[in-house]
Amino acid sequence: MMKNRGLALKLILLILTSITIIFSIVFSYNYVVSRRIIIKNIEKNARNLALATVNRIDMELHSVEKVPKSLAIFLESFSFVGGDIHDVLSSIIENNPEIYGATIAFEPYAYNRNSLSFAPYYYKSEKEVKFKYIPYAYFNWDWYQIPKELNRPVWTEPYYDEGAGEIIMATYSVPFYKTFLGEKKFTGVVTADISLSWLQEIVAGIKIAQTGYGFLLTKNGTFVTHPDSNLIMNETIFSVAEAKGDARMRKLGREMIQGKSGFAPFKSLLTGKKCWMVYAPLSSSGWSLGVLFPQDELMADILHLNRTVFFLSLAGFIFLLIVIILIARSITRPLTALSKATEDIATGNLEIDLPSIKTRDEVGKLAESFNSMKSSLKQHIKDLTETTAAKERIESELKVAHDIQMDILHKVFPPFPDRHEFEIYATLEPAKDVGGDLYDFFFMDEDHLCFTVGDVSGKGVPAALFMAVTKTLIKTKATKGLTPEKVLERVNEDVSMDNPSVMFVTLFLGILNVRTGELKYSNGGHNPPYIVHISGDIEPLETTNGMALGVVEDLSYQSKKIVLEKGDTIFIYTDGVTEAMNKKDELFSEKRLKKDLAVLKDRPVEEIVTGIMDEVKKYSDGVPQSDDITMMILKFYGRG
């Protein structure tokens, strides 16, 4: 009876399968093509919108640039007395609504031999023009120093102008010169300030659907405008990407600060929704505009259409399913037998005999499949046993890797028993079997001790390998006579090349003259160390504002210098100390670290480090360590 009906059943199943395949192809093709067309139109409109906004901002900024440029040309050709300068600056502010403030800042004694500085500043306040002389030493500010050093006009990064404009602003600075005895000499700069709120209003005018928005980044990736005010001037796209572990966002950030344009997927920082982002550079300032287009809102129509088609198809499938169920009842008996046998197999009985089904239709093939599955399960259990053994070997090898990593670090203290000019102690505790923190110290010559502490992005084996490479490069590059910034530049050049995983390392490197106490140092994005003075005062070491190594090639670093007094102590650490968390997800913090240093400062160097480590573990109270912890302490005694 079943044999007579088998062909009909096979025919029904074949027709159902064919219909399903045909419908799936048509449905998928319609959806893919429709989606592609919509995305193409969205991209075209997005690029046009971004270009229009960029052109608008550039046009405004170019109009701002013309004012100080023209004034600088006049200053180079004519001499102005004080009254003329005041009249010109006041007129600039009154007649240029986009300019918030302006000044002409002269070199020391350049305006008046009896006056160190002269910088009258006119600015808008409550819809009227006000005046003051810039009260601070402006000669060292970026808006004055950068155009002076580069000999060309520049836009500054946004900053808070405390003492003058009293707002967050960006400044366009144009250097001007005077000819004395046939020699062209730098005389000062002419500036025009724009308010950050002005840019925010322009970008805030970009509205895409319900939740789309625009934002603006500086040349360093800092958020200038964004609907989330907490990001503005507080975060960079790279710090947000690091916090979220988003490599794609980090890559897009690099492209944006490099002046590239494009259209790419992006997750909204405001809503978390998937979006498309179009980005384009501002030709005037080198900043970059990003505009987000929410995918779900822009694709709502096509999703609604496909949802309707899906439900209509579902109704058809339900009808066909009823027909199939009526036919399938005739074959439930062998399937029931197979189901019981399957339950026995699920309990671990792989020796059970499956029912013999002689038909060659789908049920017969299913029986063969169960036999094959039973054999496969046996083989899988065997393979799983071997895999478990392999995993145990890997864990053993990771333990060996941990021991090797610890062996390349200094572990014997004091490391230089015959040197009495200083004491040094360091420790590293990785968060995983192997970690990415590093420390090292060595003599470059008889009098100069080079010491360093670093923190590689990420954890585990990749970070450990990057740490070993960085440590080796530091020791190779730190040759006699080199300054700290040159060592960092050379190491950065090597680690930035062929770095597809975009790993980076923050690094503090110091070179101490153990005879005189002179300490030269450079900081590549690392936590500022603390200096514990012999007087008992504790303060962070002034930073050199360097970027982490491995992010961008051809970076320049700066060094600074201090002279340690006998008894002064330098304490260097990684963020695993200050970012250790307790059960409430509260950070250990720099404030608590400084407080503990004040309590432990008079103890031997090793006890200071172990004391800080004990305080961190006590604070964590059993919370697993989330980051590598490294500390180094150096106490200077000098000679004689």
Image (cartoon, rainbow, N blue to C red):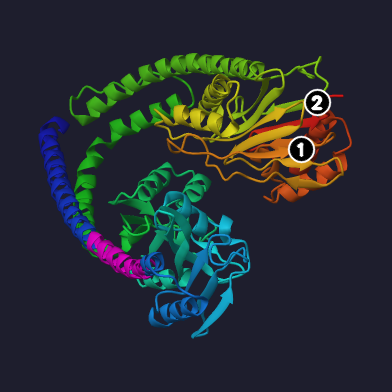
Residue 400 drawn at (x, y percent): 61, 14
- Residue 430 visible? The answer is no
Considering only vertical position in the picture, is 446 above or below 341?
above
Considering only vertical position in the picture, is 253 above or below 83?
above
Direction from residue 51 to residue 400 in the image, left or right: right
Q: Are marks 2 and 1 in contact (CB under 8 Å)?
A: no
The magenta stretch is: 46-70
Name the image quarter holding residue 397: top right
Name the image quarter holding residue 269: bottom left
Considering only vertical position in the picture, is 104 above or below 514?
below
Q: Residue at x 39, y 26 (%)?
A: 341
Residue 284 drawn at (x, y percent): 34, 59
- Amino acid type of disc 1? Lys
Q: Residue at x 47, y 18 (%)?
A: 384
Could you say which disc has been placed on residue 617 in the image? 1
Direction from residue 343 to residue 66 in the image, left or right: left
Residue 176 drawn at (x, y percent): 42, 61
- Amino acid type of disc 2? Glu
Say if the magenta span includes residue 126: no
Closer to the chain start, of discs 2 and 1, is: 2
Which sits in the foreground, 448 or 83? 83
Which sits in the foreground, 129 or 379? 129
Q: Of tags 2 and 1, which is closer to the observer?
A: 2
Say if the magenta span includes residue 52: yes
- The C terminus lies in quadrant: top right
Q: Residue furthest front?
A: 181
Could you say which disc has been placed on residue 423 in the image? 2
Direction from residue 310 to residue 514 in the image, left or right: right
